[in-house]
Image (tube, rainbow, N blue to C red):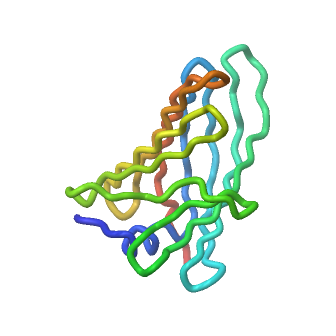
Amino acid sequence: MVFNARTIFSMLNGAWSYKRVISNYGTIDGEAVFTLTEPDVLQYKEKGRLHLTDGPVLEALQEYVYRLEDGDRLSVYFRDGRLFHHLSLGDDGRTGGGDHLCKMDFYQAAYRFEGPNAFTLIYNVKGPKKDYVSETHFVKLAVVG
């Protein structure tokens, strides 16, 4: 299956389970929901349990906004409206990525679309304050009814 920005946008809509490994930090298991709020806008909300490598378990929350822009570009924004990154798809139509400089820390996102019901998102984060890899595997939850 070859993906483009519009097919990815449509595919994302719905509920997903996720498992995330953050190098030298911990793991998160949770659920993420992409909700269509406008014709070309998906609100992303995730909630999970962060298991730190040194023992404590904390609640993890995150929100983003995914926008289909100009019909063929998918962009990810922070909840406050600042751009996080544009998703640029590779020639294979199954992988892509985007970059974000946050002060002096550089976030490099890598997406791998494994089919309509699974994808992986890896953030490689480097800088004076951060140095980690976050790898998240998403699996779409079945719709009942």
Above/below status of 72 relative to 12: below
Above/below status of 36 relative to 47: below
Is 121 on the left-hand or right-hand side of 96?
right
What's the residue at 61%, 30% (across, down)?
27
Q: Quadrant of residue 70?
A: bottom left
Q: Quadrant of residue 11?
A: bottom left
Is 15 on the left-hand or right-hand side of 45?
left
Q: Nearer the viewer, residue 83 or 63?
A: 83
What's the residue at 70%, 33% (across, down)?
50
The x and y percentages for residue 130 are 63, 25
The x and y percentages for residue 35 are 63, 72
The x and y percentages for residue 7 are 37, 73
What's the residue at 69%, 27% (across, down)?
51
What's the residue at 42%, 81% (across, down)?
71
Above/below status of 115 relative to 22: below
Is 109 on the left-hand or right-hand side of 112?
right
Q: Quadrant of the C terminus?
A: bottom right
Of all residues, the one furthest to the front in this rendering is 104
The x and y percentages for residue 31 are 63, 52
Q: Quadrant of the N terminus?
A: bottom left
